[in-house]
Amino acid sequence: MSRRLLTIAGALLLLISDAAAQAPSPEAMSAARKLVVTLKIADQYRALLPQLLLKLRPVVAQDRPEIERDYDAMTAPGSEIYTPALTSMVDQVAALYAQGFSIDELRQIEAFYAQPAGKKFLEKSDALAQASAQIGQAVSQKAADELKQRLIEALRQKGHKL
């Protein structure tokens, strides 16, 4: 799963806790759907579906070649089998965005991501998130090693044998 999708999902989960109980207005939903399209969230989800369907294949087809052929044809990329899940995901994500941001904010966010800098950010965000995570892990490991040594030394100075 891409780091960006996980980040978006995490942010959306945070929005759930603060979301108002009432449904967003049609105008808010429209602005949110436009943002979801610009962010290419559906494309990210669509990329995950083949993995899901591949995992389901042995369960559904039961190692029967005639079923496997039909299963493969029914689940081919671009087939309509994806449509209900994709539509549901887009609607739910759009609703979360619509609940978490004002219509003006949604439009401003969408405008940013529609510009060259926003598009470039979207293109590079997965790689940047992965590199940032690696940096964070490396820095944390180094900090843990250094802190361990400092704490051991401080405890030794207090007379502890380590």
Image: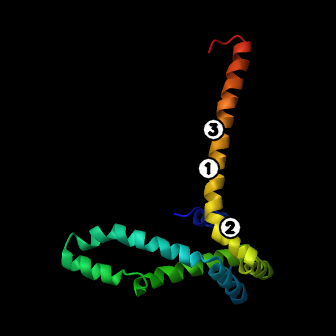
Q: Which residue is under mark 2?
A: 15
Q: Amino acid at mark 2?
A: Leu
59 horizontally vs 18: left or right: left
Q: Amino acid at mark 1?
A: Gln
Q: Residues within 10 Å of mark 2 (few under 14, many from 20)?
A: some
Q: Which residue is under mark 3?
A: 141
- Helix, strand or loop at label 1? It is helix
Q: Quick one: label 1 or label 3, which is nearer the N terminus?
A: 1
Q: Residues within 10 Å of mark 3 (few under 14, many from 20)?
A: few
Quarter-wise, where is residue 119 in the image? bottom right
Q: Which residue is under mark 1?
A: 134
Label 3 close to label 2 by CB (< 8 Å): no
Q: Amino acid at mark 3?
A: Gln
Percent of width and height locating residue 16: 65, 68
- Helix, strand or loop at label 3? It is helix
Quarter-wise, where is residue 162 in the image? top right
